[in-house]
Amino acid sequence: MDTAPCRIGLLYPTRDCGEDDFVRFAALVDPAIEVAFGYVPWGESVSDVADLDPAGKLAAVRELGEPRRLQQAVDELAGFAPEVLSWACSSCSFLCGYEGAIHQAADLAERAALPASSTSLAFVAATQALGAQRVSVASVYGEEGTAGFVEFLRAAGISTVHHVAFDAPSDRALARWDRDRIVELVAAGDSDDADAVLVPETALHTAGLLAELEARTGKPVLTATQVTIWRALRQLGRDDRRPGLGTLFAR
C-alpha cells in the first residue's frame, strides 16, 4: 500500500454535515492522506433545503453547481494546497447530465490547474473498474432526482436494473441516519440481477459499514464517500489496497 502523504481537496455543499466520514475513510485507507474542504455556497434564496418542494430542491441543487460557486470553494482551499480536487456532491454533478458532468470537472481542473473529478464521475469510474454493467441504485433522492442519476448512468453505458427512491428531506437529515437506516436503504436497493449496488449520497456515514453491507448483499457496494476518495487517489496515480473498505479497495 502506498503510504506517501497526499492532499485531497473536496468541494462540499453543507458545512458540518458528512465531512467526518470522508476524513475517517481517508484515514482508514492511509493515515498519511490529508483531506480538506472548501464550501460551495447555496443560492441566496435558499435558507433550508428541507423547506423546498421537489422542484425547488432540484433547482437549488443545479444552481449550486455553477462554476462561480465552485470557484469560491476552490479559493477557500488555497492555503491547503491540494494535489487533486473533487466536487463531492453527487446530485450537483449528475443533474447536469453525463456530458455536463465531464465538462464541469474539466472546467474545475482548468481553473485550479489540478486533476479534478466529481462524485458522480467517480461512480462511473468505480463501476467500470469493477466490470459491473448492471447495477441497482439505493437512492435517498425523490423519484425525479433518482431518475436523473439513472439517466446519468445510462449515458455512461451502465444499466440500472432496480432502484429505490427514499426521498429524504435534506443532507442534514441524511447525516443523522444511523447504521440501521443505511442497512435498510441498501437492502431495499439491492437486486439479484445487479452486479453492484450504488449509494449516491455524500452526507451518509458509510466508512465503517462497507464490509457489512457487502456481506449482506453478496456483491460490491459503492458509496459516495468511498468512490470519491478512490477516484482522487487514482488520479494521483495511487492504487491503494485496504481490506474492510469494500471490493473496490480490495482489488
Image (cartoon, helix red, strand yellow):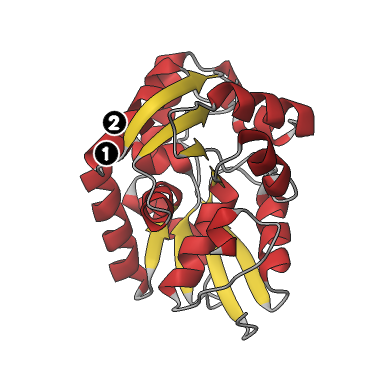
Residue farthest to the bottom, as pictured? 4
**Is residue 96 shown left or right of residue 136?**
left
In this rendered view, identify the residue nearer to me: 148 or 187: 187
Q: Specify the amino acid type for callout 2.
A: Glu
Where residue 151 is drawn, which disc sits there?
A: 2
Q: Residue at x 27, y 62 (%)?
A: 106
Q: The residue tagged with tag 2: helix, strand or loop?
A: helix
Mark 1 element type: loop
Number of numbered tags placed on the structure image: 2
Q: Residues within 10 Å of mark 1 (few under 14, many from 20)?
A: some
- Which residue is nearer to you in this view: 166 or 11? 166
Give the image location of residue 83, x and y in percent. Answer: 48, 77
Circle 1 residue: 97
* Res 64 visible: no
Query: Horizontal and vertical percent for residue 54?
Result: 45, 15
Task: Give residue 147's position: percent from left, percent from top.
Answer: 35, 23
